[in-house]
Amino acid sequence: MGTYNGISAAELGDIAWQKSRRSNSIGNCVEMAKLSDGSIAMRNSRFPEGPALIYTQGEIDALILGAKDGDFDNLLG
């Protein structure tokens, strides 16, 4: 069936989840992992078995580069 948005993160198998060094000790972070087909999965670290969203490499590039450029600074707490 392949991957799809909302797939259980557990169904993605043994992948290397990565989180920001800026995440805090109470688990307020998002984790991301590169999948074998080149897409990127994202999950909430507080619910590691929960749903994962799947993005293309281009979508993740746009997000990360936009964040670096300050495009989302208005969302900072």
Image (cartoon, rainbow, N blue to C red):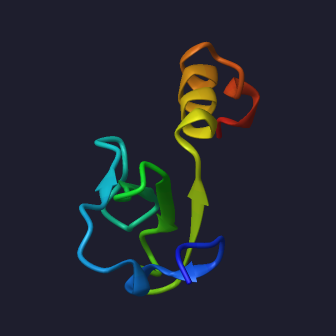
Residue at 56%, 84% (x, y): give it: 1
| Front-lying residue, 19 or 26 | 19
- 41 relative position to 25: left or right: right
* Left or right for 60, reference 9: right
In front of the other: 69 or 8: 8
Q: Residue furthest right?
A: 74
Residue 13: x, y in percent? 30, 80
Horizontal and vertical percent for residue 46?
Answer: 44, 76
User: Residue at 47% across / 81% down in the picture?
Assistant: 47
**What residue is shown at x 37% (from left), y 50% (from top)?**
23
Rendered view: 77 above or below 51: above
Q: Report the front residue among 52 and 24.
A: 52
- In the image, residue 27 above or below residue 24: below
On the image, which quarter does residue 12 sit in?
bottom left
Instruction: Please identify the residue farthest to the front as the structure is shown.
Output: 1
Q: Residue at coordinates 52% horizontally, 39% vertically from top-left?
A: 57
Question: Which image quarter is the C terminus in?
Answer: top right
